[in-house]
Image: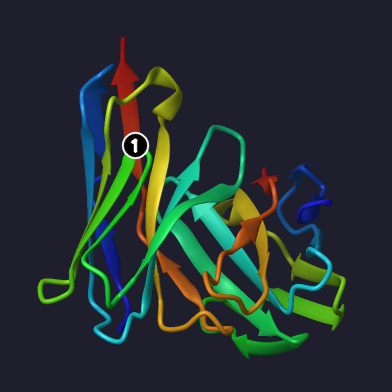
Amino acid sequence: DAGVIQSPRHEVTEMGQEVTLRCKPISGHNSLFWYRQTMMRGLELLIYFNNNVPIDDSGMPEDRFSAKMPNASFSTLKIQPSEPRDSAVYFCASRKASNTGELFFGEGSRLTVL
Amino acid sequence: GEDVEQSLFLSVREGDSSVINCTYTDSSSTYLYWYKQEPGAGLQLLTYIFSNMDMKQDQRLTVLLNKKDKHLSLRIADTQTGDSAIYFCAESIDNQGGKLIFGQGTELSVKP
C-alpha cells in the first residue's frame, strides 16, 4: 500500500511568493493532519480535518496560511505571501479511527524561503 | 491546556540501556505514544500505551506510565547505533479523531 504522499519534497522560493504544499492521505483514512517542524519550535500542529471538515485550525500561524481538503484523497496547505520565517519541514499525516489511533506520516516537504 | 515536555538530547554507549522521559499536562489524555524519526524522514509509531496501563513491553522497548505524575518513559534495552534518531512522545484524548500533541523530541545519540 502507498503511504501518505507529499509534494513537493523540496521547495526553494523567494519571499512574497505563493507556496502550495500537497498531500494525498492513505486510502480509507478519515483524519488528516498538517504539522510544521523547525529546530526552534519542534513539531507544531497547524490544522486537522475529520471527514474532510476542518476541526481545529488554532495552530495556523496567521492569515497567510490556509488549508483545504476538497475530498478524501487530497489536501493542500497554502502560504501566501511566504516569508523567511516560514522555512520549515511541513508534514502531512493521516489516520483512521482504530484501536491504536496511529498517525501515518508522509516524508515531509522541506520549504526554504529566501 | 495541552503540553508535552521532553529533554532534548541523550547520549549513550552501544549496548547500554537508554531511558527517554516525557511529561504531559492533560489529565484527560487517554492514549500516549512514542514515535521515532530518522534523518530526512517522517515520524513512525514505535509503541503506544493506554492510560489504564502502567507498563507495556515490546521486545527491547519498555514503556512506563505514571498517571498520577503524568510521566511517561521509554526504555530501550541493548541500544544499538541504528537506534540513533529523534524520539517523540505524544498524547491524545481519543483514537477516534482527536488531535495528537507532540513533545519537542529527544535526540538519541548512540556511540559505538
Residue annotated with mark 1: B60
Q: Residue at x 84, y 67 (%)?
A: A27
Q: Amino acid at mark 1?
A: Arg
In this picture, residue A98 sits left or right of residue B22:
right
In which quarter of the view is residue B9 placed? top left
Q: Residue at x 68, y 82 (%)?
A: A49
All told, the count of numbered labels is 1
Q: Residue reaching furthest left?
A: B69
Q: Does residue B41 sit above or below B34 in this rendering?
A: above
Q: Is residue A83 visible?
A: no
User: Residue B100: where, in percent of width, then height?
Assistant: 47, 72
Q: Residue reaching furthest top?
A: B112
In this picture, residue B92 sits left or right of residue B6:
right
Q: Residue at x 69, y 85 (%)?
A: A50
- Which chain's residue wears label 1? B
Q: How is the image coloured?
A: rainbow
Q: Does residue B32 sit above or below B84 in this rendering?
A: below
Q: Does residue A88 sit above or below A68 in this rendering?
A: above
Neighbour tally class for label 1: few under 14, some 14-19, many 20 plus, Cα within 10 Å? few
